[in-house]
Image (cartoon, helix red, strand yellow):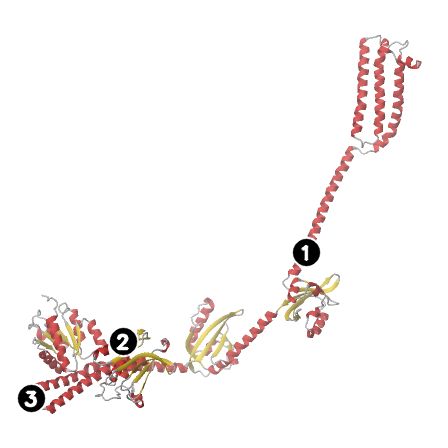
Amino acid sequence: MDDKIILLVEDNADDEKLALLALKKSNIRNEVVVARDGVEALNYLFCRGPYLGRDVNIMPQVVLLDLKLPKLDGLEVLRRLRADQRTKLLPVVILTSSNEDQDRMNSYGLGANSYVRKPVDFDQFVAASAQLGLYWLVLNEAPPRRT
Amino acid sequence: MDFFRQLLMSGDFQPHGFCYRWNSGLVWLNVLSDALIALAYFTIPFTLLWFIRKRRDLPFSWMFGLFGVFIIACGTTHVMEVWNLWHAQYWMAGIIKAITAVASIPTAILLVQLVPKALALPSPDELKAVNQHLVDRTEELGRANAELASANKALQQFHEQQRLLFDRVPYPVWVYELNTLAITEVNESAIRSYGYTREEFLSLTIKDLRPAEDIPRLLENVKKTPEGAETAQSWRHRKKNGDLIDVEITSGAVVFEGRDARLVVATDITERKKAEQARQESEEKFRSLAETANDAILSADNHGNIVYFNPAAERLFHYSSSEAIGRSLTFLMPGRYREAHTKGFDRFLSTGEARVIGRTVEMDGVKKDGTEFPIEISLSSWRTREGVFFTGILSDITERKRAEAEILRGNAELKAVNQELEAFSYSVSHDLRAPLRSIDGFSLALLEDYEEKLDAGGKDSLHRVRAATQRMGVLIDDLLNLARITRTEMKLQSVDLSAMARSIAGELAKSQPERKSELRIREGLEAFADSHLVRIALENLLGNAWKFTSKRESASIEFGKTRCNGSLAYFVRDNGAGFDPAHAGRLFGAFQRLHDTNEFPGTGVGLATVQRIIHRHGGRIWAESAVEGGATFYFTLLEARQEGA
């Protein structure tokens, strides 16, 4: 499980740090790649821009995607992932502050695999991160990799 | 005796044959001729006798008797001629000749006398002609008789038909004598209509058919119009039972049974008069309605010219009725409407196609001083013998237009506010919670990473920071939920409240299985409501009841329906802490709490949420309580769909 990468798309430095802390406290030691806006996330996944030399065959096991992001917001990122053959089946978990109906509707509508609200209580955040890690990195069987 | 002997004896005479010298040819010629003559002579009397026996009516039949005797005598003389050829009894022959002579002389004399008489007898031809004449006359007479009979019958039928027609005339008809005014003939219809029998009728004068007060006018009228037809005069007639009816009388002079008389036809116009009166009343009613109406009412003819303009129209347009009547409708509308109006008007008149008639439309009108104002007009058309007319009912809708504009503006503002609220909620949802997470998360990191450097006071402070942060997180969520309840679109349907309450109560009991509680939920409570929102309301109310009974040894919570303040209301009752009724006014305000958080946790949003849900359903919510006396929350849902208790 150690070679499985997590892509965390998060613009808030505090949240990034808390997420990494929570994953660490949940004993998840996998590599976490952090993209700080939507464009960066897409560049990473499609090996563009700064990630031009990246091996396109290496895809994260799961993408933790915030909705409110600079440049391209989370929903737009999700739309583009689902529109591309390479990332169409990539597991995407929306990890955000909001539980507004419209956000949930849009996320699932665009093909999100899961929707998790970040709790204010950090203990709960840690518990949620542990469950997420366990589920997506261990329990869940990823779709077959394309070559 | 000798004579007879001599008579029968030949004496000394030679037989006659001797005279013929017995020349046998001569003898036999004479014998044969005489014999044949005798035979013929003897035959004739028998024929005559047969004839007169057959024709007993024949006049002068005795003549035939004489003739018969004479011929027989003649025949006998020829027999004697034959006899004496051989026997020579000439005496005998002479005597017979003498007898013949005696018979023939009177016959001849009588015949001479008879001829004029016989000639006087008509000949058979004459008789035949006479006879034929008689036959013809008889036939003629028969025909004449038949004609007479059929003429008689026709006459009788004619009389019957005349009578029938007279009786069957569907109007009362009678004849009265001009001098005595006595009724001398009357038909069935009159008998039926007036209630008198024929005999009674024929004993009346026309005065008896009138109410007393009309008799002078009647007599005057009879005097005045002695001749000719009098047409259509209105009278009142009195029936046998005393009822007065209105009639129209048409009468004419006639001579009846040799006396001057008048033939009268009476038409009962009581119903017509009533209808006329009703029509007048109705017209009066509608006129007064139109005159007093608050709305302007005006009518126009098929040229579009105003024929009626009511007082409200005068007030609305500032034209007087006399100024408006006769002018075209178009002078009440701004120039820009006139062409369309004229087109539509002509189209309706030529094709009957109505775009405005029968509907209510909004347009503008022009007052006398030229100011325009918005009106609402409903047009109708009606057809009379004089053509099509139009009626419009107009009202000034300036106020309404302004109110509508205000509502539209208000709606737009409301929409903007709602959108703002939504954006605000969204922002709160995303952005307000993130700093809280940082505060809480890093406080924990501080607590854990710097545990040995923090004393008890520092740790306590950080715990308080975390508690406050988490509480704020809950407050934000409650606030967002409250806002969401206002925004959510409602889907009304039949909701089983009893089942819903049972499910919520079950969850509550499960959350604290150690608590002793009695949860009573009335069966069969249904409402027409939004299922999701009503569940939130019930969760809050039952949750509150559960929470505020937590200090009771045994909680008692009831959900039911009752009549309260005259209306049916659902209620949630508990035996919990209750509240001071003096503060009941603050109960449903957001973030208002009547209890200490330490005593009973909460944000003070729950009842505000419940109230908002009930209000959105068009219902009311109120509460009754006393400190430590439990509380009862009543609420109603949509009035119209309220189920029976």
Question: At 89% from the left edge and 11% from the top edge, which residue is drawn?
Answer: B9
Question: Disc 3 designates what residue?
Answer: B452
Task: Tell me which label, 3 or 2, sits earlier in the chain.
Answer: 3
Residue type at the position of mark 2: Arg
Question: Disc 1 designates what residue?
Answer: B160
Task: Tell me which label, 2 or 1, sits earlier in the chain.
Answer: 1
Label 2: chain letter: B
Task: Give the secondary structure at mark 1.
Answer: helix
Quarter of the picture containing the C terminus of chain A is bottom left
Front tag of 3 and 2? 2
Left-right relation of B111 to A114 = right
Residue in the foreground of this view, choosing between B361 and B21:
B21
Question: Disc 2 designates what residue?
Answer: B502
Mark 3 closeness class: few <14, some 14–19, many ≥20 residues within 10 Å: few
Residue type at the position of mark 1: Glu
Left-right relation of B550 to B267 = left
**Is disc 1 on the same chain as disc 2?**
yes
User: Where is A83 relative to B451, above or below?
Assistant: above
Residue in the foreground of this view, choosing between A63 and B518:
B518
Mark 1 closeness class: few <14, some 14–19, many ≥20 residues within 10 Å: few
Question: How far, Cα to Cα, is label 1 from label 3?
Answer: 144 Å
